[in-house]
Image (cartoon, helix red, strand yellow):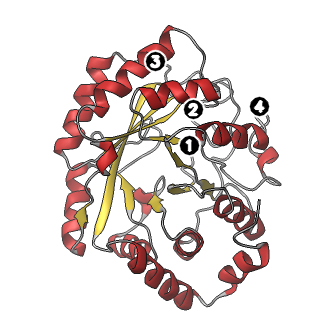
Amino acid sequence: MEMRWSLDEVRALFELPFMDLVRRASDVHRAHHDPSEIQLNQLISIKTGACPEDCAYCSQSVHHDSGVRPSPLMDAETVVAIAKRAKEGGVTRICMGAAWREVRDNAQFEKVLGIVEEVSALGVETCCTLGMLTKEQARKLEAAGLFAYNHNLDTSRAFYPSIISTRTYDDRLRTIANLRDTSISLCCGGIIGMGEDREDRISLLHTLANLDPPPESVPINVLSKVPGTPLADQPDVPIVETVQMIAAARILMPGSIVRLAAGRHRLSVSDQALCFLAGANSIFTSEAGYMLTDAVPCSEHKTDRALLDALGLRPKAPAASGA
């Protein structure tokens, strides 16, 4: 596969003066997107906790004492009711997560397929994050009407073993390849603030930008430091570094939706405005003040609508194929 971007080219973006980088990213953003639109997403944890993976950042891992209580797979009626309320709050993309290592061909997966069908019928984009999956499982999700699948790379290949030992980098890339055999769009990004250095961030973006094709959706997460996880005492990420990641992602993947994801609750209105200026055009919003679990805070619908109003922004409509 021919590389679209070299490591040196990605590194050069990180070496630009900050304001020059933001200005360049803003120009790219305006050339490919309506800068007045922000997509609102809501995460629903349809199966919480007791995950066998040991991801050092995650509150749902069975290896960590984070206080998150496991719960079984939700029934379709409950998920649809949450999705309907989210849509009323301006949300156009519903992301459903199950704390599984991998999808298994069983009754629970069949139940998830039914949930995807019912939520898709509401006229929103549906996204799932269920762990690793095979080509056949990806095709079943496609047939159920799934719009997108989230499977983050998290960090660089070199730093990855410092964060996760129960799954390899190639396992993640294999799932991405399985998805690319379908029409399902790919949501794939990473997390900063886990102890990685600048070269790890450069390597992550280099890998993402050179996927064939690049992800249609790129979430940039800032570590949510959950007590009881190995990364609970990591230092905060300076806002300049968050914006730098967003701006570089926007330049490297101009057609992608760049999502300002976990960690946004710590940002001021002006911080978030700077992220939007640098090319972020999606945020995660919530009904109850948290993302997947109550261990990870997230702004609520009312607060986020006020934020958009204050900045002269408006919610983005769902893609036509998500309706």
Q: In which image quadrant can residue 37 be found?
A: bottom left
Quadrant for the N terminus, please: bottom right
Instruction: Give the spatial CA distance, label 4 vs label 2.
Output: 19 Å
Query: Are circles 2 and 1 on residues that touch, CB within 8 Å?
Result: yes
Name the residue tied to disc 3: 71
Label 2 neighbourhood size at 10 Å, few (<14), some (14-19), many (20+)? some
Mark closer to the chain start, 1 or 4:
4
Mark closer to the chain start, 2 or 3:
2
Q: In which image quadrant can residue 279 be found?
A: bottom left
Q: Looking at the rendered structure, which numbered label has been put on residue 66?
A: 2
Instruction: Give the spatial CA distance, label 2 vs label 3.
Output: 14 Å
Label 1 neighbourhood size at 10 Å, few (<14), some (14-19), many (20+)? many
Q: Nearer the viewer, mark 1 or mark 4?
A: 4
Q: Nearer the viewer, mark 4 or mark 2?
A: 4
Residue 154 horizontal/vertical position (percent): 65, 50
Q: At 46% across and 55% down in the image, what residue appears?
A: 261
Mark closer to the chain start, 4 or 2:
2
Residue 65 horizontal/vertical position (percent): 62, 29
Q: Amino acid at mark 1?
A: Val
Mark 4 secondary-structure assignment: loop
Q: Is residue 67 visible?
A: no
**Which of these two is toward me, 263 or 33?**
33
Q: At 23% across and 56% down in the image, what residue appears?
A: 303
- Is residue 178 shown left or right of residue 91? right
Q: Nearer the viewer, mark 2 or mark 3?
A: 3
Mark 1 secondary-structure assignment: loop
Total marks in image: 4
Residue 251 horizontal/vertical position (percent): 56, 76
Name the residue tied to disc 1: 226
